[in-house]
Amino acid sequence: MIPVYRGQGRIGNYRHIRRDPLGFLTDVVRTCGDFAQVDVLSFRFYVINDPALIHQALVEQSESLIIKGGVSAGLARLIGDGILTNHGTNWRESRTLLQPMFHQSQLTDHLPIMVHRVQESLDRWRTQYADRPFCMNKELLALSFRITCSTLFRYVPSFEDAEEFADAMWILQLDGMKRHVAGVDYAPWLPSAMNRRVQRARAMLIRLGQQAVDHGSAPPLHEVLSILFAGTESPVNTLCFSLKLLEEHPQWREQMAADLQSHESAALLERIEQCRLLTQVIYESIRLYPAGWAFERFAAKDVHLNGEHIDKGSRLLFSPFLMHRNQRFWEDPERFDPTRFSNGSMSVSGVPKYGYMPFGAGPRSCIGSRMALAEMRITLGMIIAQCEWKIHTERNDSPLEAEGSFKIRLSRPLMVMMNFRSSDRSQQTQPGN
């Protein structure tokens, strides 16, 4: 029998999810284990937090357990039907269309462009934010937008457009998710302040996406919006958590800075590639705070998992956030320890396949995972090589914690003070477009 999570009853469970989705799912697993039934209002879903069951569901039963309705429907109402929200034949067509953009040979060509975009942002921070705090979330979103457009869509947006993109994404991720959980996105015509914010942000995202299409090197608009929505916020959130974790554990930051500065005669990309600890830090940051912290599947037909019957029409929920903190497989899972990944992301002692899934699992795993990792390595590596930072907190600021939205993110903007080291930039950068 599958354990049933009672919690605070159907209505109380709904309120708990709206208030704190991360805390709610954590309580489900703590109370019922790694396979549980949850009833919320008139809905029922199953939480799955076991690697063997994840393999059964997302690999062996991938044709029966599909993306349909739920959060994907809420996303579709914001960005249309693209690779994020399609299923079946439409999804396969999207994957076939976009796959060549993320081929390894393309990524190699993109790396110098990434370096150039990151250096432009570092120079901007050095001049515009000297001796004063600035919003790192917004600046990294603007940077990621400019990287994505200049690599995948072959044009370079202005910083002004990039700032507008960052503002729109912050609203869509926060208010868009709140609106979906509350059911309000089924009635976008209601004259609420939240609806107005979301609609303005959505219009801005569409305008900026259309610019990419107009330049002639981009896929259709609905696919551009999917790439911009998933391909910018995810690495940015990981980078923000990495900066926070490294300030809390400065020994790792100091060791990486020493490694990156010890061979200044080598090209920057070579130094970043040789800094194994940099990659380990990113893997550990994604373990603790995976951008895609939870995702759903819809049972298009009756299925069996571990001998248990799941009715057609049921919803199944998988959470890398919970999986990566599962004490059955991870030693001291709440501790930040990059050395877990000394042998790579797939060779952590005691962790089976699908025990670590920062980019999802099965056929629908993230198409842009290699590009995202490259962007994060280059961005974090260049920040560490050129500057130090301190998180700025005002007296009345709420605690800086993880929050479950469409992606996992910090609960408030990450304000930082940057202190740049004096060095010869010509030894740090290389030409880009």
Image (cartoon, rainbow, N blue to C red):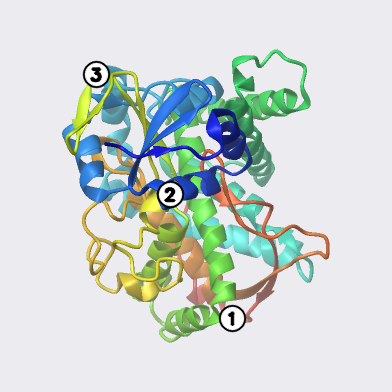
Q: Is residue 212 left or right of residue 352?
A: right
Q: CA distance from mark 1 to mark 3?
A: 62 Å
Marks 1,2: beta carbons within 8 A: no
The residue under label 3 is which amino acid type? Lys
Dot 2: what SS? helix
Q: Which residue is mark 1?
A: 423
Q: Nearer the viewer, residue 22 or 107?
A: 22
Residue 425, can we see it? Answer: no
Helix, strand or loop for disc 3: loop
In terms of depth relative to the viewer, which is nearer, 319 or 328?
A: 328
Please report the residue visible at 68 percent of the width from the left and 40 percent of the height from the top.
167
Quarter of the view holding residue 330: bottom left
Residue 59, placed above or below residue 387: above
Which of the pair 45/151 is nearer the observer?
Answer: 45
Rendered position, 56 above or below 388:
above
Q: Which residue is mark 2?
A: 31
- Front disc: 1 or 2: 2
Kindly identify which residue carries mark 3: 301
Earlier-in-chain disc, 1 versus 3: 3
Dot placed on the residue nearer the N-terminal end, 1 or 2: 2
Label 2: how many Cα within 10 Å (few below 14, some 14–19, many 20+): some
